[in-house]
Amino acid sequence: METLSMALIIDIFDLALKEKSVEGEVPVGDMPELRAFLATDAGSVRYAIEGRGERRGRPAAMLSIWGEVEMPCARCNKPVAVDIESEAVFLFTKTEAEANAMPVSEDEEDEDVVVGSRKFNVDAWVQEEAILSLPAMTVHEDGCEEDMWEDEEPEAVEEKKPNPFAALAGMKFRK
């Protein structure tokens, strides 16, 4: 029997403007898009959202996420524990058109513009930020348990391979 968890739905405009806060945790198993990048369902992502009132005339909130997940090792494909952590301020608009019309300012590089909602899915927001905080590649720091390249020594590999030019030795031209 599969257990279904309910995603947290909030009025992001109310939270931001009234400077409310909310904290929680989302298990990796409840985030299928994140799970696609991971080796296992182990772990969870904790979050804290703090309303920041208005910034540049828009409701604003800070999202902080942290947790530990297991990504596949690029060498042996076995799980590697990875800490994820991110903190960013978001400005909320009511429509995509409003978001696209927001001027980009170098002073506010730490702010992201997002289309908000009175029924805003926190779990989906946390999942998206968790994916963006993953490293591009992971490897075991102390080397892999079973290094797939250690089966044969480099000299032994060379001895087993026939010399591709050996057949040419019998084809010498004589004048």
Image: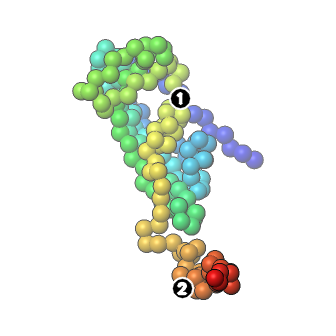
Q: Is residue 16 visible?
A: no
Which residue is depicted at the point 47% across and 63% down? 139
Farthest residue to the front: give it.
175
Q: Count all numbered tags in the image, as a single digit.
A: 2
Residue at mark 1: 121
Please name the colour scheme applied to the rendered image: rainbow
- Image quadrant assignment for residue 13: top left
Q: Residues within 10 Å of mark 2 (few under 14, many from 20)?
A: few
Residue drawn at (65%, 83%) of the image? 174
Residue most toward the right? Answer: 1
Most foreground residue, 157 or 109: 157
| Residue 141 locus on image (x, y percent) | 42, 68
Residue 81 disc label: none
Residue 12 coordinates in the image, percent (x, y)? 44, 23
Which residue is at 60% across, 35% downward? 6
Kindly identify which numbered label has been placed on residue 155. Answer: 2
